[in-house]
C-alpha cells in the first residue's frame, strides 16, 4: 500500500469514527469505512488514479468521496474532516495516548459531554457510561489504571 493510500484510508476511518460518535447516518459511516478498505487494497497510488480521473472506478468511491480524495491529493487535507474536529487543549488531546481512547472518542468527550479534566474522565469511567460510547476499546479497569499512572507522572502545581 502506498503512503498516500494509507493516509487517505486513515483519514476516512477517522471521519467514520467521528461521525459514529455523533451517531450520524450509519450508511455514511459505512461508506467511509468501505472506501478506506478499498484504498488499502488498491494496487496503485490513489494520486495516480485521481490524475487519470478514474477514482469512481474504485469500489466504494462515488462522486463525494472522489472529490475528497482529489482535495487530499491537492492540499494534503480534507476540509470536511477539519470541520468535524473541535480544537482541543493540549492536555486533552494527549488523552489519545491513554489506552482505548481514539481521537474521535476524545472529540466526543470534550465537545459533546464537556469532559475537560482527567478527574472528569475518571468520573465518567467510574460511572460506567464510557462503555456506552461507540469506539471505546478498553476495559474500565485498564483505563482507570492509566489515568492514575498519568496523574503520578504529572508535575504537581
Image (spheres, helix red, strand yellow):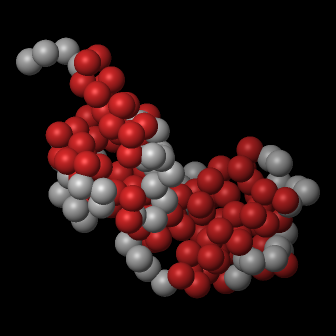
Residue 75: x and y in percent read: 56, 55
Q: Is residue 146 visible?
A: yes
- The correct choice, above or below, for 62 with respect to 99 in the image is below
What residue appears at the point 22 percent right and 62 percent down from the top-left corner?
113
Camera-nearest residue between 133 and 110 = 133
What residue appears at the point 75 percent right and 77 percent down from the top-left corner?
60
Camera-nearest residue between 105 and 84 = 105
What residue appears at the point 73 percent right and 77 percent down from the top-left corner?
61
Residue 68: x and y in percent read: 60, 69
Left or right: 148 in relation to 38: left
Residue 93: x and y in percent read: 34, 41
- The correct choice, above or below, for 131 with respect to 155 in the image is below
Residue 118: x and y in percent read: 22, 38
Question: Which quarter shows the C terminus?
Answer: top left
**Which image quadrant for residue 24?**
bottom left
Q: Is residue 70 visible?
A: no
What residue appears at the point 45 percent right and 46 percent down from the top-left corner?
139
- The correct choice, above or below, for 18 with respect to 3 in the image is below
Camera-nearest residue between 93 and 135 = 135
Left or right: 69 in relation to 96: right
Q: Check the image and name the residue furthest to the left.
A: 157
Amino acid at each position: 500500500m502506498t503512503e498516500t493510500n494509507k493516509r487517505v484510508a486513515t483519514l476516512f476511518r477517522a471521519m467514520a469514527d467521528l461521525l459514529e460518535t455523533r451517531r450520524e447516518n450509519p450508511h455514511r459511516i459505512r461508506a467511509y469505512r468501505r472506501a478506506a478498505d478499498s484504498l488499502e487494497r488498491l494496487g496503485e497510488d490513489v494520486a495516480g488514479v485521481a490524475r487519470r480521473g478514474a477514482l469512481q472506478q474504485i469500489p466504494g468511491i462515488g462522486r463525494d468521496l472522489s472529490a475528497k480524495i482529489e482535495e487530499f491529493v491537492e492540499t494534503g487535507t480534507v476540509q470536511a474532516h477539519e470541520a468535524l474536529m473541535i480544537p482541543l487543549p493540549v492536555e486533552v488531546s494527549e488523552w489519545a495516548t491513554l489506552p482505548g481512547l481514539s481521537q474521535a472518542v476524545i472529540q466526543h468527550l470534550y465537545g459533546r459531554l464537556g469532559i475537560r479534566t482527567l478527574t472528569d474522565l475518571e468520573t465518567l469511567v467510574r460511572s460506567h457510561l464510557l462503555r456506552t460510547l461507540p469506539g471505546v476499546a478498553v476495559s474500565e479497569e485498564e483505563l482507570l489504571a492509566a489515568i492514575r499512572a498519568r496523574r503520578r507522572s504529572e508535575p504537581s502545581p
